[in-house]
Amino acid sequence: MTGMKRILTSFINPVICCCLLSTVSLFHVGCSQNSLDYTEIKQINEKVTEAELKKYLKVIKLLPQNKTPTFPSVFAPAPTWSHIRSLPIEDLVNSEQINLSQQWDIQRISDHFGTRNRTLKKALLRRNISKDQFISYTLALGLAASRTQLRKDQNLEEVIEKGNKIIQKLQLEKRPFSSLSLEERHRTLHEAMWIARVNRAERLIQVPPENINLVRRHWDEIKNSLPPEFLKNPLDDLTDTLEERGTPFTINEKEDSDELLQWTKTDAIIGTDQPSPPSKKIR
């Protein structure tokens, strides 16, 4: 009987192993149908290929109005610290820099979309792209689009160099913000604007020239797909008008144009004084 058991065992074990391997293989086949072939996240300093752009735009075409869903802002505004903030200025600056960096976190943006956006989820599944990949493509292409909106006089290296000097000076300030006079608070907030400028410039300068050229070649398709934030000059809303243009106010060319000034005789105020006699010629 012992010999018979060994024979049966030696026969049954390979059969069981074969069945288990077949089951595992079938399991992997089933999983591979729903898995992504390519899961790498695109960084903002990496080249986006024509094929990747084409795949991205295919997702866009499956979304309402052929646009990305409401995208959270990544270009944070300049600091607006309350006059009652009792933290030292150096701590406020460091905290502001951390917060601005977190604006670009893919997980934060992904959490904004949530899990209830079924339309986006279906579109990504059909095109075999993960949500994080879609977000990373949007950031890479969006930054490239923003870079094309800069003026020639907006040198990113100069912005970063000048801004870092001002920021380093602020980081040496240990006085509580609430202890400053009104004039000092105004000046400090004016200088703190450079935190947002540098944050934007540091990301814009990372955009590869290939991505800029890619966006320009496909501008008609891309401009209707990207979030509006990426379709305007990213530094203009942080412009120091007095410093850069030498004027303490902005002029709206459409509203303040001289062409809008009109004169009619009925509205004119005409005085009743007699005209002065003509002056005598001097010999």
Image (spheres, rainbow, N blue to C red):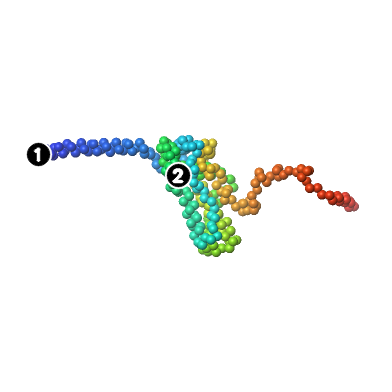
- In depth, the one of 270 and 172 nearer the eye is 270
Q: Residue 131 appears at what percent x and percent y?
A: 43, 42
Circles 1 and 2 in contact, beta carbons < 8 Å: no
Question: Residue visible at 17% across and 36% down?
Answer: 11
Q: Position of residue 147 (x, y in %)?
A: 53, 44
Residue 95 in view in this figure: yes
SS category of the residue bearing label 2: helix
The residue to which callout 2 is attached is: 113
- Residue 233 image position (x, y, % from top left): 56, 45
Q: Mark 1 highlights which residue?
A: 1
* Earlier residue among tags 1 and 2: 1
Q: Residues within 10 Å of mark 1 (few under 14, many from 20)?
A: few
Q: Residue 166, relative to residue 139: is it above or below? A: below
Residue type (three-letter) at the residue carrying disc 2: Phe
Instruction: Identify the residue shown where x is 48% and y is 41%.
Output: 69
Q: Quadrant of the N terminus?
A: top left
* Crowd tier of the residue under label 2, counting other residues whose Cα lies within 10 Å: few below 14, some 14–19, many 20 or above: some
Q: Nearer the viewer, residue 97 or 215?
A: 97
Tag 1's secondary structure?
loop
Residue at 43 percent of width and 42 percent of height: 116
Note whether 134 is above or below 91 in the view shown. above
Of residues 5 and 163, which is closer to you in this image?
5
Could you tell me if residue 47 is visible in this image?
no
In the displayed orientation, state which residue is furthest to the right.
283
Q: Amino acid at mark 1?
A: Met
The residue that appears at 63% across and 53% down in the rendered structure is: 242
